[in-house]
Image (cartoon, rainbow, N blue to C red):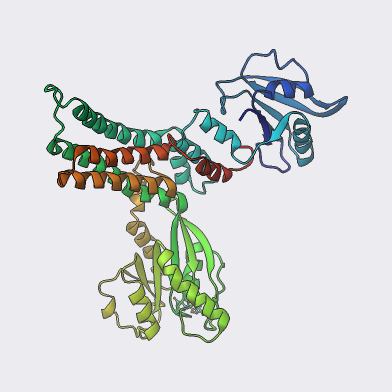
Amino acid sequence: MDDTIAAISTALGVGAISIIRVSGKDAIATVNQLFSGKNLEKVPSHTIHYGYIKDQDEVIDEVLVTVMKSPKTFTTEDVVEINCHGGITTTNKILELLLSKNIRLAEPGEFTKRAFLNGRIDLMSAESIMDLIQVKTDKARKMAVQGIQGKQSKMIQNVRQKILELLANIEVNIDYPEYEDIEVMTNEKLLPELEEVQNELTEIISQSQNGQILKEGIKTIIIGKPNVGKSSILNRLLDEEKAIVTDIEGTTRDTVEGSIQLNGILLNMIDTAGIRKTDDVVEQLGVNKSLSLIDQADLIVVVLANNEPLSQEDLEILEKTKDKNTIVVINKNDLPSKLDKTILKDRVVIETNTVTLNGIDSLQKKILELFHLNQLEQQDYTYLSNARQIALAKEAKNSLNDARCGLLEQVPIDMVEIDIKKSWDKLGEIIGETYTEELIDQLFKQFCLGK
Ligand code: GDP
């Protein structure tokens, strides 16, 4: 981290302005060598200066240069930002000039990585920065902003603090058992306090499923035998002709995807190939994929045709989806019914047709209801926001549970303490208080260049 790094921080393309960011101990001196204007090494911090970037005597561009001195900068190092005219050639030329000096090209996410390693932000905030750049909906944006402000970290730190108090009390009792005035941390006393923290963690984990939905959307598959109207329903929901609709059985051979926003939540929809026993190899691949998608989906929409009796394939699909989050759609309700609905009495059923659009609204409403999407609005968007964080929170919760079982079984307190300490460590990993270099490298690689 001793070296000075540079990268283009704006999107590379034609635009009014591009920003090249430089960070590290040589940032100011090196840019100053290329800059004609004020002496940047003498200007106060957090000031902006007009001038030219020059390659020897040749003027490359007219620029504004922002000088920000350590430590009150994003990376905590000296940072210089060159605002040049937008356009690939000029921007690249300036970057090239910097790289010809004692500066190297930053890796993706390296500025944020430095901000983390220098203690300017914690790991959760860093992840929220990445989220904010990539969010697709307004709700996901709100969640990412909460993360950048440190609200998620604070939530974890609060739980950690409570665990620390438990540990401190146990320690005192182990070290000074003879002190009568120190609260005796008997199992009976420890147990309710530990359970309280465990419940808090359970609540955070369950709320975080909402966080995942806000961020990633709901993975939905539409499944059913050929010609029941799956593609038509997808199109009505998407409001565009994305899936090919035709009446030759088996046209939707592979899967067709699209996303819609329901109350600001992305619904990522996949129209699967018709489930049908087939000899056609291409179609067979699609059918296998459909069945495997059932397990990966958050929501399954099973489509049946109102004008046909239930077939063996329909029954198979219904059986395979019976323990999943499923809505059964009886489509073509404009046609006379030949479908026996008694088998569907315990299922969530919506009747639709894609000709007059009857029932399409009810289908959307049902999805909102199943995922409590209306209620998400009233909540404060403070959720764990990715699989890494949730997995660690679960491990922390499991360790607390081990400690709880230990207490119930009268295991010696110093053994119980090991589990509680483990839980504290896992929560520390969420905010990045402890980390491995591998994890950090992996994580920041996913950032874009210049961030
Ligand atoms: P998929 O194979 O399940 O994707 O079915 P498609 O969406 O391709 O539809 C098959 C045929 O059924 C097409 O000719 C559609 O126009 C027709 N169809 C779809 N929905 C309805 C509906 O609600 N009512 C009627 N009468 N026909 C429909």
Q: Residue at x 56, y 82 (%)?
A: 281
Left or right side of 174 for 265: right
Front position in the image: 83 or 162: 162
What x and y, as percent, mark residue 269? Answer: 48, 63
Q: Residue at x 68, y 24 (%)?
A: 27
Q: Is residue 231 visible?
A: yes
What x and y, as percent, mark residue 380? Answer: 36, 40
Front position in the image: 139 or 174: 174
Q: Is residue 296 above or below residue 83?
A: below
Q: Residue at x 71, y 17 (%)?
A: 40
Q: Which quadrant is the N terminus positioned in? A: top right
Front position in the image: 94 or 248: 94
Q: Quadrant of residue 426?
A: top left
What x and y, as percent, mark residue 337? Answer: 35, 83
What x and y, as percent, mark residue 78? Answer: 62, 23
Q: Which quadrant is the C terminus positioned in? A: top right
Q: Is residue 172 above or below residue 163?
A: above
Q: Is residue 240 above or below residue 116?
A: below
Q: Is residue 357 visible?
A: no
